[in-house]
Image: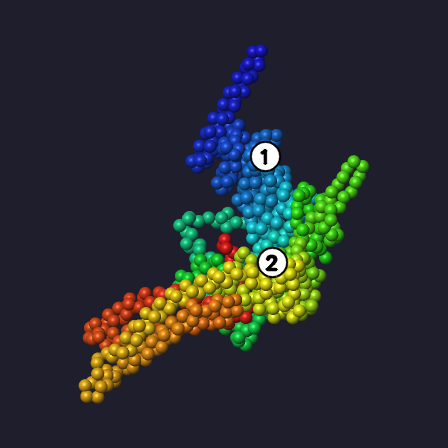
Amino acid sequence: MGDVIMAEKGDGIASEDIEETSKRLFKLCMHGEWTEVVATYEKDKKAQTAKITRTGDTALHVAVNDRQCDIVKKLVALIRDKEKGEREALRIKNERDNTALHFAASIGSRKMCEYIASDEASLLSMRNVDGETPLFLAALHGRKEAFLFLHYRYTSDNTDRYSYCRRYDGDTILHSAIAGDYFDLAFQIIHLYGDLVNLVNESGLTPLHLLANKPSVFKSGCHLGRFERIVYKAIIVKKLTEPEPHPTEDQLPITEEENFSYPKNFETCTDLLTVVKVVTTPLTHFLRKILPHGGTERDLEASKKTATNNEAETKSPGSETSDWQHPLFPPNYQRCVDLFKIVFVIMSVIFGTGSANIKRITRRKEKHVWSAQIVDVLLAKASTYEYADDGSVPEQKLENKDHHTNPYCFDEWGNVTWDRNTEDKQQKNGNEKINMEEKVRETPILIAAKNGVTEMVEKIMESFPVAVHDMDANKKNIVLLAVENRQTYLYDLLLKKKNLKESIFGSVDNEGNSALHLAAKLGDYKPWLFPGEALQMHWEIKWYLFVKETMQPHFFRRYNRKNKTPRDIFSETHRDLLKSGGEWLKKTSESCSVVAALIATVAFSTSTTVPGDFKDDIGTPTLGYRPEFKVFAISSLIALCCSVTSMVIFLSILTSRYQERDFGKILPRKLILGLTSLFMSITSIMVCFCVGHFFILEGKLKSVAFPVYAVTCLPVTLFALAQFPLYIDLILATLKKVPQRGYKTPLQ
């Protein structure tokens, strides 16, 4: 009995010692006293397994999370000094079952991964609560250096290496890399783990599906300004290369932080070096093209092959090879254009407009180039006909999924079925009844068509021509989806495929809607680039007429299953937009007509007032011989005529009927003419004022004339600048045949 009491007391004292050690380690870690933490680890062996935070982290977890590389090395060395059976300190998990190696892989520290897992390779197989291994977390957070190190050091020759690449929801490391836009890492994963290309997660999505759902990473889904387009073309992005089959330790990549360190106040210098690198890359590329260089016959033959392959690449509206598809200059002028682009980029950096923008545009172009490469390798490694997947599914069974899309079906065990019927299949085996529900999902080409990813749609059609016949649950093919989602560039691309004209352009969905019905239907999201309800209505009419011109005449009066023609659908769905567009035009016309009336009043009084009065004998102006007087007279007359014209045009807009057909041509043209007259009257009245007032200023006062004129004209200039973007949008809307789609969603 006494021995039992003594044992209980001993256990109580031990638990109190552990709790006290944990509190002490917690304070040391929070205050950054890592030397004391190392000393505690060395003196007290129980400190190595003590959990010091509410989430169950040890001091080693905290040191890794705080990026204390040297401290981690010392702590791991102290743990390994113990006997082999006591190395469980490296395997301790927190409440989310993350070990210290999980943290090191998430951070991306190659050195800390090496310290922790040097002779404990079994740590790579440990999973957290989500089923994520350290290798998976490195891919999830885009830590390319740590991922490649863990792969080549511990898993390259392991037969079970594919088991480290998937978590419980079925997502693989390739899914995670693509979802996070880590395309350089995804490219490496595809070549190292080729079987992952065709694997699906619980939702039935392959990596190609995820890529099709990211239109912003492709050039076709990106809108660039004028300055950005010039810089974009000048930037040279290196294409991704396949990994080495058996690289040495020195050939493995290492993070810049671990390669060298610098004080925080040196960050400006590093940014400057980054910009210099961006600028010198196209310069080096340019010099290589213009400077003579020797080479072997093999080099010349390789260069010829490269040139031939580049010419054979698909030239889609959003691809890299279509930048100069219709050049405005002879081919031998290309070097001059390249030199101009390089000079432009350098000047933009010098004048302070390019430092942040160039880095942002560079990252954007890297995504565009690399995503196109990812599509190529995914399609090359996909199954021959089942280009989306080969039926591989995650470890867990797919249950309670109601995705009804053609043409790929999955039974509840994940096996591919080719029965297109949507009936439930039942089998009886004794007292057991098994219900098999088809698991169907959209194919990548349908998702890409919905999102307007022209590069992916075109490449899939080239690799698998039969894919153009894919349909979703509503029997919508790529043409119907492109029209419904206002993907103008994709629809224009499909129109150029003459072999598709008769096969898929005449299709209808399960409600009997043709492409013209879907073009007439207005969705909740208005994708057009230009602002204003009137311009939105103008684009909707233009899009409807553009699709109508491409369809067969018998589709014009075609009824869907609700007995509605495209014209009926257009009137019903655009009723609210028509009303709001009319109100927008009224407000714009009222504000502009008020300004035009004020300018007309001033111009009328100005035109009847002559500076310097008249000569008594003959009645001619006394200052008529001066050039300024002629400018005054002409500008006042132009201001009066233009302001009256503008006022009359805006009044005609206010009295319009605001019918649907009026928004197609009449109202936009009236608005353009009214704004043109208004801007001309504003400019003329300002010139008239400045010239007329210049006669009053004599001698020394002339030196302050121009600053006074600038301040006086500022309010009117601000009004003109506020309306000028609308004027430009109207001009572009009138000139463009195919509407220009916006690329930003409402949440961006």
505 or 652, which is in the foreground? 652
107 or 435, which is in the foreground? 435
Q: Quadrant of the N terminus?
A: top right
Q: Is residue 11 above or below residue 691?
A: above
Identify the residue at horizontal 61%, vertical 70% (top origin): 549
Q: Where does residue 384 sit, x and y in percent of width and height?
A: 72, 57
Q: Where does residue 239 sit, x and y in percent of width and height?
A: 58, 60
Q: Residues within 10 Å of mark 1 (few under 14, many from 20)?
A: some
Q: Amino acid at mark 2?
A: Lys
User: Which label was assigned to residue 91?
Assistant: 1
Question: At numbered mark 2, what does the secondary structure look like: helix, strand or loop?
Answer: helix
645 or 269, which is in the foreground? 645
Identify the residue at horizontal 52%, vertical 31% (top origin): 51
Identify the residue at horizontal 63%, vertical 53% (top origin): 209
Q: Residues within 10 Å of mark 2 (few under 14, many from 20)?
A: many
User: Can the viewer see residue 607 in this picture?
Assistant: yes
Q: Is residue 100 above or below residue 523?
A: above
Q: Where does residue 345 sit, x and y in percent of width and height?
A: 46, 65
Identify the residue at horizontal 59%, vertical 30% (top origin): 86
Residue that label 2 marks: 450
Contact between marks 1 and 2 (CB within 8 A): the answer is no
